Amino acid sequence: MTVIDDYFPALLMKPDEASVEKLKKSLSTWFASDKYAALRARMLSIEFLRLLKKRVSYSKLSEITGISQSVLCRYVRGSIIPSFSQAISILASLTLSIDINGIIKRFLEREQSLVIDLSRLLRDPYLIRILSFVLLTKLVGKRVDKILVGNPTVLPLATAISLELGSDIVLAKRGIKYPNVSYYEEVVVRSMKDAESIYVDKDLLSRRDHIVILTDVVITGKTLRALINIVMKAHALLTETITVVAIGNEWRKRISRNLIYLSYLEKPFF
């Protein structure tokens, strides 16, 4: 049993039609680039349906997508493959039906830990796949050459996204540095007695790269600011900055650009 089994079905809702139509237009443009991409969209829609069917009834999926239960059943079984337009509709409807913010908040409420640790949540392959679908829709039409990972906790999520986008993963390091290796380095000062160096191998980033930064939690924004500075030092282009959880508003003092987050908390639970 996964960490979200007991409340996931309750966090599915029928999405707003206007939002679905807007996302469908973006997805259609993205996946219509060539025949392989169009076929990939059709297969992804089946994968998404199969993923949700493990915990959601056909009646609920029918309510969300507007497709009859019998047709959905044939999609899930692989008897037929949805058309391109039907696949885009399924992907848009299912993505917008999942209350990711609610799922993450309930997990954190249950943990009641003094430290926000998403490692248990982000090792659930079922949830990782769902989160990757959601984040892919936020990166529609954007060039992503590399995903700069700010914390190993989000590596499974970065891997799922990179496999779909065909991008590389670059992990920001802490701790031991190797001799004869050049690094982009930033120091994060947390207090008068606490400072940490974050660094990335120089040969892993170039000015031709379009970068997405992905991290787990943003509170003060100091670490995320350091990662942004590293991208700037490499003269690479920053496509998006993404965090799983954003807490409070202190980070807004340091992060002026748009930040995509899956869950937002006014303050920690502790």
Image (cartoon, helix red, strand yellow):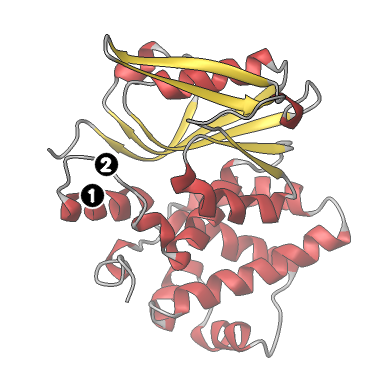
Which residue is tagged 1? 108
Helix, strand or loop under label 1:
helix
Tag nearer the camera, 1 or 2 = 2
> In the displayed image of the protein, which residue is found farthest to the top?
192
Tell me: residue 52, above or below residue 72: above
Which residue is tagged 2? 116
The numbered mark, 1 or 2, whose residue comes first in the sequence reads: 1
Quadrant of the frame with the N terminus:
bottom left
Q: Amino acid at mark 1?
A: Leu
Q: Amino acid at mark 2?
A: Ile
Instruction: Say whether marks 1 and 2 touch (CB < 8 Å).
Output: yes
Answer yes or no: is residue 257 visible. Answer: no
Quadrant of the frame with the C terminus:
top left
> In the displayed image of the protein, which residue is found farthest to the right?
35
Instruction: Give how far across and how far down residue 193 sits, in percent.
Output: 27, 13
Tell me: residue 44, above or below residue 260: below
Residue 173 position by quadrant: top right
Tell me: residue 99, above or below residue 202: below
- Classify residue 24 as left or right of residue 204: left
Q: Local crowd at mark 2 within 10 Å, few (<14), some, or many (≥20)?
A: some
In the depicted view, which residue is nearer to us: 203 or 209? 203
Instruction: Give how far across and how far down residue 141 sits, in percent.
Output: 71, 40
Q: What residue do we see at 31% from left, 51% from top?
A: 104
Q: What residue do we see at 50% from left, 68% from top?
A: 65
Q: What residue do we see at 27% from left, 9% from top?
A: 192
